[in-house]
Amino acid sequence: MPVGITQQQRIWLTFKRNKTAVAGLVIGVLIVSMAILAPWIAPMDPLVQDPFNRLSWDVEGHLLGTDDFGRDVLSRIIWGSRVSLMIGATSVLLGLVIGTALGMTAGYFRGKPEIMIMRSVDVMMSFPDLILAIAITAALGASTTNLILTIGIVMTPRFARMAYGSVISIMESDYVLAARAIGARAPRTLFRHILPNIFGELVVAGTLWVGEAIRLEANLAFIGLGVQPPTPTWGNMTREGIDVLINAPWISIFAGLSILITILSFNMLGDGIRDISDPKLRGGEGKGYT
Amino acid sequence: MFNYAVRRILQSIPILFIVFSLVFIIVRVLPGDPATAALGDYASQAAVESLRKSMGLDVPLWKQYVRFLGSLLQGDLGNSIITGYPVGAQIVRVLPYTLQLTFSAILLGYILGIPLGISAAVKRNSFVDYFNRVFSLIGLSIPAFYLGILLMYLFSIKLRLFPVVGGGDLWDLGSNLRHLFLPALSLGLVMTAYITRMTRSSLLNVLMEDYIRTARSKGIPAKIVLFKHALRNALIPIVALGGLYAVVLIGSSVMIEIVFSRPGLGSLMVGAIKQRDYTTLQSVMVLYALIVVALNLVTDLIYGLIDPRIQYK
């Protein structure tokens, strides 16, 4: 490692050498661009039906064929990325904000808040994500807002646990002790001294959990509890495709492949970041796959 | 150990209590009135009222809650509001399918995953290791339902080797196994990815320990060092975490049951949500909670048994 460089440069150099992580980042950026540019790059309107070309693979103008209503599968996949990524990112953001607040409260005040918050976190974490999500969606009803709320709630305990652990360890540091010694009140200590120091790792973890959130959304959509048709999402496209799997396998195959590639890119990126923070070990264990 | 076990079992009681309460709350806030849902929109007001009464929905919430806990303690799960049949009997009918699926997937995961993980760790950075890493990365990323669809398309539709959907006859071994194969393979491959990765990193960790270097420098053959010294310790977390993986697998089994239209707890739960059959839904969720809490308990006990230090934390 060259000398005389900043911490950021060093992290970037280590990252660049990790081919898996770079590939993950590139694929991720491509998928996000696809979602943002959907109106301009989608060859067709994802909702326009063509009754004469239903379930056909080799029609001119439909690169990935058409679905049961004669809609263009490629355009639906491109538009579907918007819904999946938007729900994934917003729900993780929600979980990040609520979870961090809860975790910091538990870690800073200890005592009763700690017991109440962390016990609830334990109970929620002991459940399979999907079953928890199914139960909450069933209670709230399926709509985009409720979906974000549901996945956000499922994500909250992870952030709470992480923030809690960081706060506990940071509370003993000299600068926090100093701040408290000169009489800084709880909000000031929490927001000026503690939060800036734990925020980085929470955001990194959050970025990687977007993949998990997208998986959860796809699962719910596949069950029929997600965003309702005709709005295309990768999950509900895979679901619709399974009824015509014999005649038109491409619908399920390509919609599902989009989910796989997206989650894969987040996991590749995650592995790379883990390598940077712990070069001794390649490959750890994450919680929850469905 | 006895004290630890008792303490740990006592600790799960309040957790169960919280989870049961959570189930009660979630099911009560379900949109729509269950009585109206059961009778349809055109039922008379009187009919809806009398059904509400017989379902116990006319009393205050706290009374419903006490009744709910009371009947749970007696093992009474009530009747389905859609079919009228006892929920307990329905669960008993489908539970073997879910257990069969989950256990075969776990078994498959260990049988394939441990050798794969060992080969990857021993030949680190070789082609085998590289293949294993790609395999487990894809396995961890692929949604179980998508893997199920791919296998279904390949083996059932294209090659016509296995039935497309259904659970088969539980008492006819041939039909049962043919229906089990693809769902168990889908779930088992995902499990394999987890076990492979876990085995690899756990074994790599152990291989870096001092006592391994000592054993090698004493001139003990590499194979004996690997299987006698290293593997024994490396397998501890893998075996102990089996319960935790099983919990995660139960979540995935819901998706696989839906893809293959296989009877099971997951299908029962999703069906109950769609029909707003709240008695069935709440019973299935209670059962899931029981299974999860029991698995977590078993995991902790196994861990305590293997690693006595944990008992004193």
Image (cartoon, grey):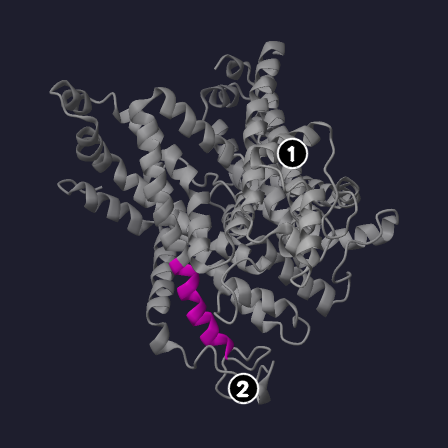
Which residue, given by chain and number where applicable, does mark 1 sit on?
B68
Most foreground residue, B46 or B247: B46
Where residue A162 appears, as percent x and y from the top left, is 37, 34
- Residue lying at 40% horizontally and 77% vertically, measured from the top left: A42
Residue type beneath disc 2: Asp
Secondary structure type for disc 1? helix
State which chain disc 1 sits on.
B
For the question of whether residue B117 can be seen, the reply is no
**Mark carried by residue A68:** none
Q: In the image, is B114 to the left or to the right of A20?
A: right
Q: Is residue B195 magenta?
A: no
Q: Provide the residue span drawn in magenta.
A: A72-86
Is residue A282 placed above or below A167 in the rendered structure? below
Where residue A60 appears, as percent x and y from the top left, is 51, 88
Residues packed near mark 1 inside 10 Å, few (<14), some (14 to 19) or many (20 plus): some
Which residue, given by chain and number where applicable, does mark 2 sit on?
A50
